[in-house]
Amino acid sequence: MATHYSSSAPPVRLGRHSLQALIDALRGDGYTVIGPRLEDAAIVYAPLESADSLPEGWVDQQEGGHYRLLRGERPALFDYVVGPHSWKRYLYPPRQRLWQAHKQGKGWRVKEPLDNTAPYAFIGVRSCEIHAMRIQDRVFDNGAFADPAYIKRRQQAFIVAVNCAHPAATCFCTSMNSGPRAKEGFDLCMTELLDEQRHEFLVEAGSDKGAALLTRLPHRPCDENDLRQAEAVATAASQAMQREMAPDVAALLKRHPEHPRWQEVAQRCLSCANCTQVCPTCFCSTVEDVTDLSGQTAQRWRQWDSCFTLDFSYIHGGSIRRETRSRYRQWMTHKLSTWHDQFDTSGCVGCGRCITWCPVGIDITEEAKAIRDSEGGT
Amino acid sequence: MTHNADPMRPIPYRIHRVRSELADTFTLDLVPEDGVHSLNFAPGQFNMVYLFGGGEVPISISGDPARTAPLVHTIRAVGPVTRAMKALGRGDTVGIRGPFGTTWPVIEAEGSDVVIVAGGVGLAPLRPAIYHILANREKYGDVRLYYGARTPDDILFLSELREWRGRFDMIVEVTVDSARGYWAGRVGVVTHLLERGRYDPEETVALVCGPEIMMRFAIKTLNQRGVDNDQIYVSMERNMKCAIGFCGHCQFGPYFVCKDGPVFRFDQIASLFSLREL
Ligand SMILES: Cc1cc2nc3c(=O)[nH]c(=O)nc-3n(C[C@H](O)[C@H](O)[C@H](O)COP(=O)(O)OP(=O)(O)OC[C@H]3O[C@@H](n4cnc5c(N)ncnc54)[C@H](O)[C@@H]3O)c2cc1C
Ligand code: SF4
Ligand code: SF4
Ligand code: FES
């Protein structure tokens, strides 16, 4: 994708209260600002007009099948990690009208879809989520075909990353090389510096767009100490990572399409599709064709779909993947193995959402490990 | 490809003629509504055919690749969308996106003998390859078509089969699974024809299209006769919602059948083909 991220501007400091200036500047530039907000007892991504709506002082507790928000010990704005939402719902909406056609005599004519969504600015994007966007970029511009609406939204988006301070127990981005520190793919990247003396953000520009915006915000230069403190946040986050993905998992799964573990996990999996809905890289969709009551107008909609449904693999005569075993195998093998063949990258960024939001707590890292352990050796 | 910037947008095509082939199978000759859109395709490729408000299905192109107009599709009515398409008539409009996918190896097969194995409506995706081979007959060795249908009433393109069988440069054998009324031809599965056919395994390129179970047995028989997997090409069917690699439905192991297929050289997929429910 053409978006180019690089900047030579030195990092600066923004005070806690300059976040409102950031939001205002982005809104003034015509962006719809989206950020983390507390809704229905979870951190979700929703429109953000005021920095006061950020989930100040909240931390999340995540485990297989478990998500809970707790009051933290400090008034940090970003002390939680990812929730059930991902930015994919804005770049690749759950339901989207592709086009509309109108009857004309015996024939009909297709009208251009109207896409007048304002460009998005995302605040609080984590490193794993930037990686997830880059993975979806490869899906929706695959060399042969490109999705013009996705590309437009993606190229217009302004990305304000945040470096994670406290990974959840379900995170495993270090072993997927996708975090916790955001290295590129953002316009701005913030590290929250919070102690008794101050509440500030160290901000790096990752693009000219980002650097230009920074100059318009009240900021102060950084010193060595600020840089060290920001580095320490990232290092501590790396060290706090509890889970990891089995090494060489892509080749491992290729060796085991008939492993007994697929049957075993199928006894727990409900085929509910939660994992695919929360996953920031899952891209499968289906289409729905509808007409209005008069039959004069037809619309085609595209909506998220999941390889966990029976219909997904339906062809005349019956579905290909009838058993949960086959569907779970498809999902996990695709994420971790065949994705490499298709897109030259893993389909998993280690965000842990599928673990947390699985109602029965199935853990993709555990499943991979079980298959690996069955091979013996080290 | 087309002047279509959005690959999900269909181009309206008008039905110029409907030919009833079998009780449940019909052929549409289509011309672009704007009179100018043209679609070059290679044998084995398919289009997404859209019914106004009703749905969109992948259908192979069954016409002659040397002629850009009309665009020809042969469709078997099996479910809601294809049944509704059967009710369409001359002058009605459908939407076309395509052509998509890989092609039969008509270039690679030059200089070789060609064995074409078709089952049921699987003859339709192979017909463009047959047209191409017959139009360039001197480039190929022996050409054989083995075709199996359920009953004598299910034999697709009957008059063309007769015509091809009358040629001196092509062997055509037809068999049916079962015959109730008068039928002087063969009864039995198409693999029997393959077992006995007098083709030279070393020199042969085989093109296979039909129900998956039929392809399975055909490949087994070809292998037993000494035709290796890298001499065999098959056309795969999977659920398809986009045909451009976006929707994920058509995945078959590492492949997207819509863009890495539908035609595969069998050695590419042999190990996947043997897995159940992949
Ligand atoms: C590459 C390719 C080429 C094809 N070429 C032809 C052809 O030349 N002639 C022909 O008659 N048929 C062809 N088919 C099969 C044809 O697409 C299905 O018969 C058709 O989709 C059935 O749709 P339906 O809604 O009428 O029936 P239903 O069986 O009710 O199908 C419901 C939905 O499931 C999906 N679906 C069902 N069966 C298939 C299938 N076999 N393949 C893919 N998706 C399916 C479709 O999305 C369909 O709308 C081809 C399929 C593929 C993948
Ligand atoms: S598979 Fe699970 S851990 Fe990996 S990116 Fe998707 S939701 Fe996150
Ligand atoms: S793995 Fe968990 S979240 Fe995914 S389909 Fe199975 S039960 Fe649902
Ligand atoms: S049909 Fe959508 S990815 Fe192949």
Image (cartoon, coloured by chain):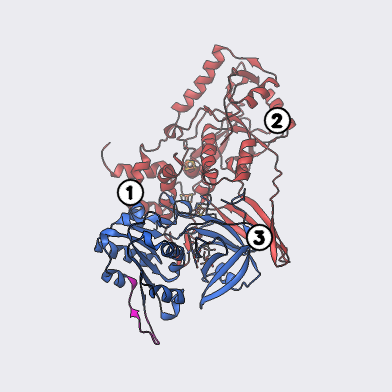
Chain colours: A red, B blue
Label 2 or label 1, whichever comes before in sequence order: 2
Which residue occupies the foreground of this view, A298 or A293?
Answer: A298
Disc number for residue B35: 3
**Which chain is mark 1 on?**
A
Quarter occupied by residue A108? bottom right
Q: Mark 3: which amino acid? A: Gly
User: What residue would you read off at disc 1?
Assistant: A256
CA separation, marks 2 and 1? 49 Å
Q: Mark 1: which amino acid? A: His
**Which chain is mark 3 on?**
B
Disc number for residue B156: none
Q: At 37% from the left edge and 52% from the top edge, which residue is drawn? A: A262
User: What residue would you read off at disc 2?
Assistant: A26
Instruction: Name the spot of residue B244 as percent of width and height, x first.
Output: 53, 51
Residues at marks 2 and 3, common chain? Answer: no
CA separation, marks 3 and 1? 53 Å
* Residue B173, placed above or below residue A220: below
Quarter occupied by residue A146? top right
What SS does tag 1 mark?
loop
